[in-house]
Amino acid sequence: MAVLVDETTKVVVSGITGREGMFHALRNRAYGTRVVAGVTPGKAGRDVEGIPVFDTIGDAVAATGANTSLIFVPARFSTEAIYEAADAELRLIVCITEGIPVRDMGRVASYLRGMPSTLVGPNSPGVISPGRANVGIIPGEICTPGRVGVVSRSGTLTYQIVHELTQRGIGQSTCIGMGGDPVHGIGFIDSLELFEEDPETDLVAMIGEIGGDDEERAARFVAEKMSKPVVGYIAGFTAPPGRRMGHAGAIITGTSGTAQAKAHALEAAGVKVGRTPTEVAELVEATLS
Amino acid sequence: MDLYEHQGKELFARHGIPVPRGIIARTREAARAATETLGGTSVVKAQVQVGGRGKGGGIVLADSPDEAETAAARMLEEGFQGRRVTRVLVEERLPIAKEFYAAIMLDRSTGTDLAMVAAEGGVDIEELALAKPEAIRRLHIDPEIGLHPYHLRALTSALPPEARDVVENVLAGLYDVLTKEDCTLVEVNPVVLLTDHRVFALDAKVTVDDNALWRQRKTEMMKSSFPTDPVEFRARKAGLQYVKLDGEVGVVGNGAGLVMSTLDLVQQAGSAAADFLDVGGGASAERIATSLEVVLSDPGVRVVLVNVFGGITRCDLVARGILDALERIKSSVQTVVRLEGTNAAEGRRILEEAADPRIVPTSTMLGAAQTAAELAKGRAA
């Protein structure tokens, strides 16, 4: 089963004729994902190694039955691509683009409430259900099919933890990169909910970082709603307060949002929190055995 | 980007929020002259990107040009809480009757704006929220509908009647600043009501979204007024995400989460990172080389730790970048390298063939952090 992406996923790539869009569309297709269309305004009728290009997502959906949007367009045009995909009622929208103004995302979040689409990102590495479909830029070769669900605010840190799991022979049902921006689509709670209901997921690894209160809210959800075990990790214990560490979301102001506060909240909810990525993999292994 | 108070007030004035008459002074003499211009008394305020100035000596009420000069001299010489002070704001003194608190900020958990008004100003709002939650009015504003009069009425309902209309105007101005200037926070603590019932924003705390600076040119130009460490300046010019820290292990990695995690592991291993440096995704050999140059230009760095998990970044290019940098820099500092992911085998082979004694290859992230910490301790001894 997995969650969000699987064999039924049919991807339309916004920005497919750009360097990044083309590279990853082809990489996703080589992984076995059904990449059925691309969109670049003004380039309808062309194709990218056999993937047909359309002017609009609407045209792409009508011609190919695409149900999932993957967005690579530059930051200033990305919210437009998200609105377009939402209006086409695609079930999943994965936005890889980073650097979108946060107030623009506030309006997107407001517009998407009550719409059928699920947004992943922006500033996301994408979603992969190993052996089934890869939508985004997560390297497929570090993953292996299995029964651990992974959800993370980070990109390469997720790769690190997935790699440590794979090396121990522990496979993943789905890895969700929710993205590092302060205002984003799917969060920990939505992801935990999906994994709780997924019969092919036995345990969830959640990877958080300083800033915001996503992890604290997730902790409450785990305590109240999760029957499956959850293992956690938080990056940024040594981050100085008030300094920006790359991710727009990773800003600590005052006491709330610190790594300590997050780790405590998770532990109080029964989540085992690893102090290193390696320890996270060890905790997952110990919990499953 | 956090603005200085005087820059925030510039934005306020542009959007019709009344602010006190003020003059920027970069020297003690200028602070004296400004106070004379303002009628012989003033408030001298250190311009820094941190809060807590009132308690920390960063704000001084001057009863004469002499006092203003002395206060300004101290601030400009000593700085404030370890930060350099390059200018002070010299403002007119006002006859204050009442103080309030007003702020609007982006609530990241919902993507909507959260407005807050309190009948008590000049206090620590987090403390007030705990001690007297009923003193604070708060409500969310959906960006789809914007700010409406009913929002304003609800927000000012805790204030004395004579303050409501004027504070409503301030709030409307703040919302204008927030939305039109791409801010994530606008906070005024305090908003003051004068004895003649006029209202002023006595302070301004404004945070602008860095991702929106391309369409906020006027604000972007304010960036150049912030003093930066020379190493930070160099990193910024190269487009690298760099934050200077106080430790001895210079960390370079790809991706903010991975780099933060690396910093944590270095500390757990008994050392401390000298910086946070994220090369970003898909970095070229040149970018890696520049990153190493930036890190090595920090005299506090005893050991460098490169931790890359290649996704769109290719480890062979990272390896070449490291060799390029070590060729250019005549440094004896050892560099612990851990490469994993895309083209990692090729990257490791390139480093092995170079056989540079300054390069210490490691195979795991944990091992790399431990090795770097041990080497740093060895060099410190």
Image (spheres, grey):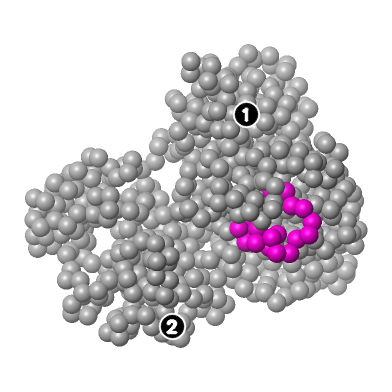
Q: Is residue A257 left or right of residue B35?
A: right
Q: CA distance from mark 2 to mark 1?
A: 54 Å
Q: Main secondary structure of the magenta part?
A: helix
Q: Quadrant of residue A140?
A: top right
Callout 2 amino acid: Ala
Helix, strand or loop at label 2? It is helix
Q: Depth check: give the residue in front, A259 or A59.
A: A259
Q: Please state the chain letter of the residue tagged with numbered disc 1 in the rendered image.
A: B
Q: Evaluate whether residue B182 shows in this view.
A: no
- Start-end of magenta stretch: A214-232
**Percent position of residue B11, x then y:** 36, 65
Q: Which residue is mark 1?
A: B369
Q: Is residue A49 above or below residue B354?
A: below
Task: Say if residue B199 shows up in the picture.
Answer: yes
**Could you tell me which secondary element the residue under label 1 belongs to?**
helix
The answer to whether residue B100 is left or right of residue A264 is left
Residue found 48% across the figure and 18% down from its top: B380
Circle number at residue B154: 2
Amino acid type assigned to the residue bearing label 1 in the image: Ala
Location of residue A143 in the rendering, given as x and y in whole percent from the top left corner: 82, 43
Q: Let me know if residue A67 is in the magenta part.
A: no
| Quarter of the figure with the N terminus of chain B | bottom left
